[in-house]
């Protein structure tokens, strides 16, 4: 049963991309301790948690690992940046080295935090000031998530523009240098500011951001469905619909894993 679940949730092609990124666990020099667990089984358990949205203590025993072991391994992988590397590697494989555009958007709906505190949370202005988080997503024209971030629900959207642009991974190309810079950036009015326009021009980016009170956002709406589709793909993983993690790094880790799985599905579709 465990092998069937591993092959179903983590195909061989995806495991080949993730396995080289996993840190090695050396045996204790004094001996003793517990026997090492299968890395793929633990990784499959984490994917199951992301997909189903169940609690750690409700992890089925069919994966061959306990919930405590899966949580400890997940914490170690989060500390070494595994999910960021996996998402960047998948985005670099699926992106085309040609000229393209970017779509930037956010989503704070249905991200109420079940924790009374925790990092990367803030009073949600559209939910009577209750604690919540906001997802910031940057995707290409095909909907592939290139950079993701988590912030408090009260943080203004414009503050996430520069970090997301700087976090764009390099394109994996067989010929020529890797292309890091896109051509156009489409975003909502909330990301508009004179400082951002100047910053984007310095980097050769053409901004397609409607000016508040001057231009209509209808033309931008023709392309908004792309970023909405990307966010819908991410929200298909039930662990992201409501934030249960007290640690913001753990919630961001699940978001990075969801982005990596989305990139893999796009890569598998292109391969077929």
Image: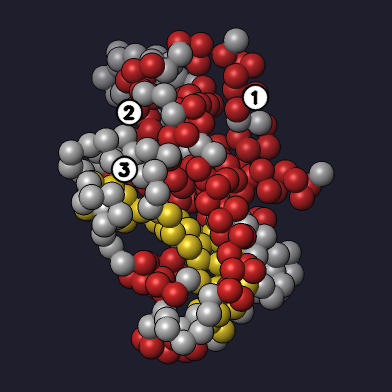
Residue bearing mark 3: 112
Residue bearing mark 2: 72
Q: Is residue 65 above or below residue 22?
A: above
User: Do callouts 3 and 2 mark residues in contact (Cβ within 8 Å)?
Assistant: no
Residue 8: name its quadrant. top right
Q: Earlier in the sequence, mark 1 or mark 3?
A: 1
Q: Quadrant of the C terminus?
A: top right
Q: Nearer the viewer, mark 3 or mark 2?
A: 3
Q: Earlier in the sequence, mark 1 or mark 2?
A: 1
Crowdedness near tag 2: few (<14), some (14–19) or many (≥20) residues, C-alpha within 10 Å: few
Q: Is residue 147 above or below residue 242?
A: below
Q: Earlier in the sequence, mark 3 or mark 2?
A: 2
Residue bearing mark 1: 8
Determine whether the residue tagged by mark 2 lies in a helix, strand or loop. helix
- The residue depicted at 61 percent of the width and 60 percent of the height is 225
Label 3 to label 2, Cα distance in Å?
Answer: 25 Å
Determine whether the residue tagged by mark 3 lies in a helix, strand or loop. loop
Q: Quadrant of the N terminus?
A: top right
Residue 9, horizontal then vertical, whole percent: 60, 27
In this orientation, which residue lies closer to the viewer: 171 or 100?
100
Q: Total of numbered circles in the picture?
A: 3
Residue 255: name its quadrant. top left
Residue 138, horizontal then vertical, whole percent: 51, 62
Label 1 to label 2, Cα distance in Å?
Answer: 23 Å
Residue 217, horizontal then vertical, whole percent: 53, 75
- The residue depicted at 34 percent of the width and 27 percent of the height is 71
Q: Is residue 210 above or below residue 137?
A: below
Residue 170, horizontal then vertical, whole percent: 57, 65
Q: Residue 61 got which mark?
A: none
- The residue depicted at 36 percent of the width and 23 percent of the height is 56
- The residue depicted at 38 percent of the width and 16 percent of the height is 58
Label 1 to label 3, Cα distance in Å?
Answer: 31 Å
């Amino acid at each position: 049963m465990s092998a069937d679940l591993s092959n179903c949730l983590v195909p061989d092609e995806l495991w080949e991309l993730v396995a080289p990124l996993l840190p090695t666990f050396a045996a204790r020099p004094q001996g003793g301790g517990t026997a090492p667990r299968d890395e793929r089984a633990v990784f499959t358990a984490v994917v199951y948690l992301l997909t189903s949205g169940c609690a750690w203590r409700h992890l089925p025993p069919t994966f061959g690992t306990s919930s405590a072991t899966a949580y400890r391994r997940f914490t170690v992988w989060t500390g070494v940046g595994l999910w960021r590397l996996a998402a960047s590697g998948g985005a670099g494989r699926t992106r085309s080295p040609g000229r393209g555009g970017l779509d930037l958007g956010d989503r704070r709906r249905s991200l109420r935090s079940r924790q009374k505190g925790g990092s990367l949370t803030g009073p949600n202005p559209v939910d009577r000031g209750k604690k919540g988080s906001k997802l910031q997503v940057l995707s290409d024209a095909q909907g592939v998530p290139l950079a993701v971030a988590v912030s408090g629900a009260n943080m203004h959207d414009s503050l996430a523009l520069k970090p997301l642009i700087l976090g764009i991974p390099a394109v994996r190309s067989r010929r020529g240098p890797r292309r890091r810079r896109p051509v156009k950036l489409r975003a909502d009015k909330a990301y508009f500011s004179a400082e951002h326009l100047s910053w984007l021009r310095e980097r050769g980016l053409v901004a397609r951001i409607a000016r508040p009170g001057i231009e209509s956002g209808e033309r931008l709406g023709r392309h908004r469905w792309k970023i909405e589709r990307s966010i819908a793909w991410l929200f298909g993983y039930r662990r992201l619909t409501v934030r249960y993690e007290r640690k913001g790094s753990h919630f961001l880790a699940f978001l990075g894993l969801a982005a990596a799985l989305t990139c893999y599905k796009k890569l598998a579709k292109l391969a077929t």
